[in-house]
Image (tube, rainbow, N blue to C red):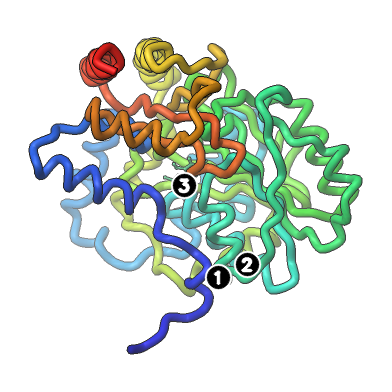
Amino acid sequence: MINSASRISHVEEYYFSKKLKEVDALNKNGKGIINLGIGSPDLPPHESVIEALNNAAQLTENHGYQSYRGLPELREAFANWYQKYFKVKLNPDSELLPLMGSKEGILHISMAYLEHGDEVLVPNPGYPAYSATAKLAGAEIRYYDLKEDENWQPDLNELAKTDLSKVKLMWVNYPHMPTGAKVDNELFKKLNTFAEQHNILICHDNPYSFILNEKPESILKNGPNDHVIELNSLSKSHNMAGWRIGVIAAKEHHINNILKFKSNMDSGMFKPIQLAAIEALNLSDDWYQQQNALYKERKEIAFKILNSLDCSYQSEQSGMFAWGKIPEHVTSVENFTDEILHHAQVFIVPGTVFGSNGSKYVRISLCADKEKLNKALERIIKFKQKK
Ligand SMILES: Cc1ncc(COP(=O)(O)O)c(C=O)c1O
């Protein structure tokens, strides 16, 4: 037997890839599970975006390898988008790097900056890729607590009391997944100061900036500096999760460091996808308004599902999930969600997937239409009545 590298012995198969196999098996047995698990938009991108892909795919010259830095026109479109919506000025030639989804950017940043002996501050709860990529890079993870009674924001004063000398990088993400905590510009300011004081690179992961969030915000508000990097993505904002389009915005030297890793991994993004991404970035404000109107209606139903499960929740939540606190008497959230899966045929996610501070919470995805959400609600009400 050939042993795998120790690098992968510390990372586990992604929760969803495991759990979705179980959901698939149940479906094969005719269970018809309603999947309210993953945050993959169920709606299509704007028709002009699909048309741009189709048209570009017809041309022979569009099928070759592409530049590692992406098309200049795509970087220009990202720069204009950042200027229009985030009021951030970025140099398209040097401060933007298109990605195949922001998830790959999380790995590239980790591989470009972390090594043995480095520590990484990772939010608990938070997106699992931050810790998985830190492990792959051989760094030590230091989870920092996010708590409901602190609006899911880090206590930077507490952190500053600890030894931060080995901390190289800190992950932050607002609007926050999974809790839906909103962006707070004061926090961004504090994070900038904290990063400078302790010589830490703050990586802000910003894929939910357009979802149920009145005003997109960026941690780069005062321009990129040595201590901040931002990731963004078209997966959620433009219903393009499967297309794999994201971006890193940062100072030129960071872009160049990240490119050293990335250019050894891939050979550029399919040109028709880049051209379609330009179309998406140039959509008018109506696009975002229409999407949010739908998500707003869906969130109301998701909150009804939380009510039917006797979960409590904050009504102001950004992003494409509803996050709720399970009843006091429930001791295991995983048993709680498994029971819902097997007895009500609805898949919702236990908060433990996102860290120990999620152990009293569940997450419901809004990536299902109203009909499905209402059906899920009906099934859960029925299941609760029978119990
Ligand atoms: C917080 C967070 N960051 C990053 C991603 C990855 O997004 P992308 O599709 O751009 O790779 C996700 C996807 O669910 C996410 O929830």
* Lower sequence index among marks 1 and 2: 2
Question: Quick one: 334 or 362, which is closer to the camera?
Answer: 334
Q: Is residue 381 above or below residue 112?
A: above
Amino acid type indicated by mark 2: Ala
Which residue is denoted by mark 3 in the rendering?
Answer: 246
Residue at horizontal 23 percent and vertical 18 percent from the top: 379
Which mark, residue 49? none
Which image quadrant for residue 144? top right
**For mark 2, does the 10 Å Cα neighbourhood hold few (<14), some (14 to 19), or many (20 or more) residues?**
some
Evaluate if marks 3 and 2 touch, with contact meaning CB atoms under 8 Å apart. Answer: no
Q: Is mark 3 within 8 Å of ligand 1?
A: yes
Residue at horizontal 42 percent and vertical 21 percent from the top: 288
Secondary structure category for the residue under label 2: helix
Q: Is residue 201 above or below residue 115?
A: above
Q: Quadrant of the C terminus?
A: top left
Q: Is mark 2 within 8 Å of ligand 1?
A: no
Evaluate if marks 1 and 2 touch, with contact meaning CB atoms under 8 Å apart. Answer: yes
Which residue is denoted by mark 1 in the rendering?
Answer: 261
Secondary structure category for the residue under label 1: helix
**For mark 1, does the 10 Å Cα neighbourhood hold few (<14), some (14 to 19), or many (20 or more) residues?**
some
Which residue is denoted by mark 2 in the rendering?
Answer: 112
Q: Nearer the viewer, mark 3 or mark 2?
A: 2
- Coordinates of residue 55 in the picture (x, y in percent): 20, 44
Question: Quick one: 27 or 216, which is closer to the camera?
Answer: 27
Q: Is mark 1 within 8 Å of ligand 1?
A: no
Which image quadrant for residue 151? top right
Distance of label 1 from label 2 (alpha carbons): 6 Å
Amino acid type indicated by mark 1: Phe
